[in-house]
Image (tube, rainbow, N blue to C red):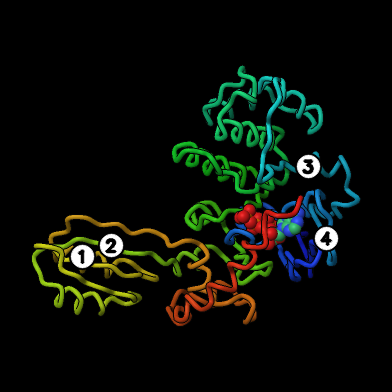
């Protein structure tokens, strides 16, 4: 089966800065593929290359079996694209703008536009320049989905959307996949990719540091834990929670009558929840650390090791040490960023 998207040894250089270091990606038709990575990892650069907004320095790209540099308007009509930085400033209403896009993208079912606008909750009668960032983003999503393209390429598509609309959007992705469409979306939010994607590639510093099916990545999820407990002293809480598999950086401190437990858990959370249930729990938060830290914990420094498959690294905790030293490598891309014009 021909891949919907394939890149081989893709390089992109901006002046002296190398944004992509030989990227190999394969997106199978009819799947939702998540491209995830911290700021500056190269996600936008990759997606722009696929739709021929920018051209690679070296390497090959195939999109729906064609080279985007030669596919022209015919190939573009087969793709729905949401750019990372959507600018909609005109006086035209949402309806007008979408009619204009429909002339470019090809036949659009009118009912589909109204249906998408209702689902996302945007008023198409208002001039787009008067819309909030999130509502502009909804117009961007409608223009990408409305002609039911074979391939959707979505750069940070949920940026600016509130959680309810994000959930609707995830449902739209599932429906697109069920209808046989292929989706490539980028995000720097791990949980979003976990909910939406079948397969994932983790990008860091212009390299794929891991790829595979998303179920394997979920196993490796890292969460910070913070709980306020009563009914025990700090020493006994500490000794109980240091025994939880995958729990590290565990700390317990007395705060008045309560004990504040903090730590990081990698992998299954069930043993932790069962241990917590033995205490009076007054407060509990479990949150993802930022993606940069998750990537480093799971996959180490992308500049120093060969990319493992996600399936080979099931969150065993083996690679979770030395995070702060390694963090420095990832931050560099971000520091260099945002200066140059795109
Ligand atoms: P974000 O999540 O912040 O959008 P990203 O993963 O999409 O990040 P890119 O925008 O692709 O990352 O940037 C990758 C690297 O290329 C960064 O180091 C960035 O500074 C650099 N870069 C991107 N565009 C340009 C440009 N036009 N000129 C110079 N450097 C650029």
208 on left or right of 106: left
Disc 2 from disc 4: Cα separation: 45 Å
Q: Which residue in the protein does label 1 denote?
A: 260
| Distance CA(mark 4)–CA(mark 3) | 21 Å
| Mark 4 nearby-residue class (10 Å; few <14, some 14–19, many ≥20) | some
- Point 64% across, 25% down: residue: 129
Secondary structure of the residue carrying tag 4 is loop
Q: Can the viewer see residue 43? A: no
- Whether ligand 1 has any atom under 8 Å from the Cβ at mark 4 is answered as no
Crowding at label 2, few (<14), some or many (≥20) Cα neighbours within 10 Å?
A: some
Q: Which of the pair 44/150 is nearer the observer? A: 44
Q: Which residue matches tag 4?
A: 56
In this picture, is 321 found above or below 127?
A: below
How busy is the neighbourhood of tag 1: few (under 14 within 10 Å), some, or many (20 plus)? Answer: many
* Residue linked to disc 3: 78
Position of residue 144 relative to residue 112, above or below, is below
Q: Pointer 2: what residue?
A: 226
Calculate the distance from the C-alpha at mark 2 to the C-alpha at mark 1: 7 Å
| Image depth: mark 1 or mark 3 in front | 1
Judging from the image, what secondary structure is the residue with disc 1 in?
Answer: strand
Disc on the earlier residue, 4 or 1: 4
Q: Earlier in the sequence, mark 2 or mark 4?
A: 4
200 with respect to 229 (left or right)? right
Instruction: Quote the CA–CA distance across marks 3 and 2.
Output: 47 Å
Helix, strand or loop under label 2: strand
Q: Locate residue 313, reporting x and y percent.
A: 51, 76
Query: Which-is-in-front pick, marks 4 and 1?
Result: 1
SS at mark 3 in the image: loop
Any part of residue 116 in sight: yes
In this rendering, the count of numbered labels is: 4
Give residue 207's position: percent from left, percent from top.
67, 70
Label 1, label 3: how many angstroms apart (C-alpha)? Answer: 54 Å
């Amino acid at each position: 089966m021909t891949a919907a998207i394939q890149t081989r040894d893709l390089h992109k250089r901006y002046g002296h800065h190398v944004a992509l270091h030989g990227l190999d990606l394969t997106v199978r038709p009819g799947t939702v593929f998540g491209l995830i990575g911290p700021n500056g990892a190269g996600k936008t650069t990759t997606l722009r290359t696929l739709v021929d907004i920018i051209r690679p320095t070296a390497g090959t790209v195939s999109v729906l079996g064609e080279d985007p540099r030669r596919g022209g308007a015919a190939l573009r009509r087969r793709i729905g694209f949401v750019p990372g930085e959507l600018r909609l400033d005109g006086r035209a209403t949402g309806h007008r703008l979408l009619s204009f896009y429909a002339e470019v993208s090809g036949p659009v079912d009118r009912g589909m536009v109204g249906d998408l606008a209702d689902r996302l909750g945007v008023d198409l009668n208002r001039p787009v320049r008067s819309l909030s960032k999130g509502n502009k983003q909804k117009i961007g999503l409608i223009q990408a989905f409305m002609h039911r393209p074979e391939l959707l390429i979505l750069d940070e598509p949920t940026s600016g959307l509130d959680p309810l609309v994000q959930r609707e959007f995830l449902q739209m992705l599932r429906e697109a996949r069920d209808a046989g469409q292929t989706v490539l979306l980028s995000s720097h939010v791990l949980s979003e990719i976990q909910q939406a994607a079948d397969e994932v590639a983790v990008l860091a510093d212009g390299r794929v540091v891991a790829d595979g099916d998303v179920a394997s990545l979920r196993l490796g999820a890292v969460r910070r834990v913070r709980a306020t407990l009563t009914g025990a002293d700090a020493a006994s809480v500490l000794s109980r929670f240091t025994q939880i598999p995958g729990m590290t950086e565990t700390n317990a401190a007395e705060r008045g009558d309560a004990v504040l437990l903090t730590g990081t858990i990698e992998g299954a959370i069930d043993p932790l929840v069962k241990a917590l249930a033995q205490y009076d729990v007054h407060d509990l938060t479990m949150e993802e650390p930022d993606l940069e830290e998750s990537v480093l914990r799971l996959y180490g420094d992308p500049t120093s090791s060969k990319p493992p498959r996600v399936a080979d690294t099931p969150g065993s905790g083996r690679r979770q040490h030395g995070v702060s030293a390694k963090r420095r490598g990832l931050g560099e891309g971000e520091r260099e960023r945002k200066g140059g014009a795109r």
